[in-house]
Amino acid sequence: MNTPIRWGLLSTARINRRVIPAIRASARGELVAVASRRQASADSYAAEWGIPTAFGSYEAMLASDQIDAVYIALPNHLHAPWTIKALEAGKHVLCEKPFALSVAEVDAVSAACAKTGCIAAEAFMYRHHPQTEIIKKLVDSGRIGDVTYVWGMFTFSLVDTAENRNVRSIPAYGGGALWDVGIYPLSFAQYIMGGAPTHVTAAQIIGETGIDIQLTGQMTYANGAIAHIMGGFDAPFQTAARIVGTRGRIEIARPFVGVHDVPENIVLFDADGNRELIDVPQKELYLGEIEDMHNAILDGKPQRVSLAQTHAHTRTAVALYEAAATHLPVHL
């Protein structure tokens, strides 16, 4: 395939405003189209963002030979179905997290990738930032010894009213704090630990619409290490993470949403409590996931967030929801 990769936005979701500059800043991609369910909406959005082509339906964009790859940021319950449709139309897919709401959906996407030869990836932007790479190298180098504990949280206050219902609050749409923000510390813990836990326990607070507005989970690993995660819609914006080892710990102030204007974002503590500030190069948060897609499509390089990792994310999230509902441990 000749460069550049021609991108289409499948929806006019708010998150697009972070992805559009990333595509345009990438060396091997260009943004050529946007699709909406109505032509007027697509035309308006294309004019606002300077996008050459506007499609009045998702199907029309997938049928076009002008598009090589699509970015999907639909409501959660539509992620897997439209990812599969895009793959079957011969398009590569970068799909927002959560990639799917069941293990069966992840398996169906994997089967579609195998059948079509196209690539699909879960859009965890923080996994592609230099900060995350630095943290993993610190852990793998043994600077803090053997990892025994990981903790992470991500919360924000969800604005939701009966007159203006937020899609995150609708159960049928895959709403819920774990799927929306808790999935970040979940994926972070699994990245540090090297895979899925053996069993989980969880507790949740249910909001008036029936979704979890807060979910806290414990994940136990085969080596005895433990991770605690929390995602919530019932507290002001906050992200943080901690990795504890037998010879020290790493504290991260903003693990999932970028590191701008945070001078002490990563702090390494040794066994005696001495602190070392770790420098983090600045990079646009969403650029790495676009570059990773280009590397996979054009160069055949392995994806940084593999479908096997996505399978583990989904499997663990489903288990945490089951544990929270039953008040019992769930074994994976």
Image: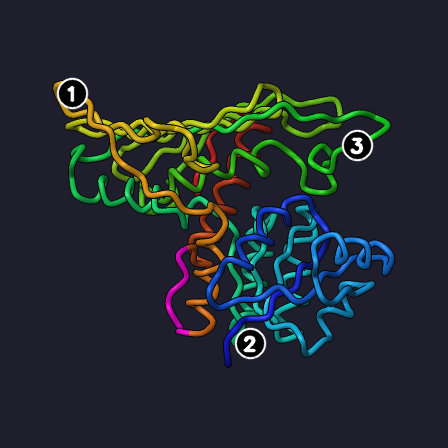
The label shown at residue 115 is 2
The label shown at residue 274 is 1
Q: Measure the C-alpha gap from mark 1 to mark 3.
A: 48 Å
Tell me, yes or no, whether the highlighted magenta stretch contains residue 10.
no
Amino acid at pointer 2:
Lys
N-term-proximal mark, 1 vs 2: 2
- Magenta range is 299-304
Of residues 254 and 141, the one nearer the viewer is: 254
Q: Measure the C-alpha gap from mark 1 to mark 2.
A: 53 Å
Q: Is residue 148 left or right of residue 312?
A: left
- Residue assigned mark 3: 165
Of residues 237 and 330, the one nearer the viewer is: 237
Tag nearer the camera, 1 or 2: 1
Q: Is residue 287 left or right of residue 244?
A: right
- Residue contact between numbered discs 2 and 3, judged by CB atoms under 8 Å: no
Quadrant location of the C terminus? top left
Residue at x 63% of width, y 61% of height:
83
Residue at x 70% of width, y 61% of height:
51
Amino acid at pointer 3:
Arg
The image quadrant that residue 14 belongs to is top right
Q: Residues within 10 Å of mark 1 (few under 14, many from 20)?
A: few
Of residues 98 and 7, the one nearer the viewer is: 7
N-term-proximal mark, 2 vs 3: 2
Q: Residues within 10 Å of mark 3 (few under 14, many from 20)?
A: few
User: Relative to 79, is 28 above or below?
Assistant: below
Coordinates of residue 120 in the picture (x, y in percent) = 53, 63
Amino acid at pointer 1:
Asn
